[in-house]
Amino acid sequence: MPEKKILVVEDEADIRELIQFNLEQEGYSVTTASSGEQALAQVKASSPHLIVLDLMLPGIDGIEVCRALSSYDIPILMVTAKSDDADIVLGLEMGADDYMTKPFSPRVLNARIRAVLRRRKKFSARQGAVNALISHNGLEVDTIRHIVTYKGQPVDLSATEFSILEFLVRSPGWVFSRGQIIQACKGADYPVTERSVDVQILAIRKKLGDSGSIIETVRGIGYRMAE
Ligand code: CA
């Protein structure tokens, strides 16, 4: 298998070197950047398979880097100094795939990177073949006939509830902000606001008999389908 290339963007030299050392131990080929400007230049020069991106950078910050790279289709794992929910939500909406808050252990970083790469691979495979019937953790979603069953029992969902469930179940383990859910599901039976996403999720959970273990709430960020 060819080496996966990872770009590490971090302005603090000691953290950058630590991450680089750790990822090289894992067998990745690592390039680094210490500013947003360098990061954008490195992406063009080295076409990385994944970017570990600190959000707090001098000059062009991490959010701007996400925005600039949104058309590149390179998975981005954001790193934030504190659990700053607003930045995390913005980053996800700008196209980042996942996030971690500092301080983190190398083992957790490695696990997150593997998870992002694995999900990306599944996602690309799925884009090739239109997946009409999705099965996940007891849920069966027939996306053509709009039929949902859970543990073999039919679940009667409204059109909006169905689109939200279909959107979440297509990417188990991915956290989506309310804004992303709205973007993905608008055009259903009525306009969706951030507050109404919560209401719809509540209704879906009720119909599934789910207390939050199937559709998980990620505090301050949004929702995800349990992996
Ligand atoms: Ca920083």
Image (cartoon, rainbow, N blue to C red):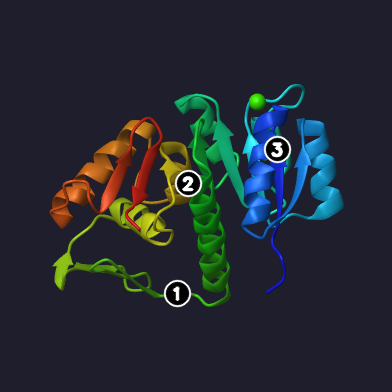
Q: Position of residue 153 (x, y in %)?
A: 13, 70
Q: Residue at x 58, y 68 (%)?
A: 124
Q: Residue at x 69, y 27 (%)?
A: 12
Which quarter holds ligand 1? Answer: top right
Viewer can see residue 113: yes
Task: Please tell me how crowded label 1 is: few (under 14), some (14-19), or many (20+) other residues with Cα within 10 Å.
Answer: few
Give the Cα distance between marks 1 and 3.
42 Å
Q: Tag count in the figure?
A: 3
Which residue sits at x=82%, y=36%? Answer: 38
Q: List the residue tagged with mark 3.
A: 17
- Would you name the residue on which mark 1 appears? 131
Q: x, y (%) of residue 8? A: 70, 42
Residue 19 marker: none
Tell me which label, 1 or 2, sits earlier in the chain: 2
Front-most of 94 and 155? 94
| Quadrant housing residue 227 | bottom left
Q: Quadrant of residue 47?
A: bottom right
The residue at label 2 has a CB less than 8 Å from ligand 1: no
Amino acid type at circle 3 is: Glu
Label 2 crowd bin: few (<14), some (14–19), many (20+), radius 10 Å: few
Among numbered discs 1 and 3, the one appearing first in the sequence = 3
For mark 2, what is the residue? 108
Q: Is residue 10 above or below residue 125?
A: above
For the residues bearing labels 1 and 3, Cβ distance under 8 angstroms:
no
Disc 2 marks a residue whose amino acid type is Val
Label 2 vs label 3, nearer the camera: 3
**Residue 74 in view here:** no
For marks 2 and 3, the one nearer the N-term is 3
Left or right: 222, with 55 as reference point: left
Q: Amino acid at mark 1?
A: Asn
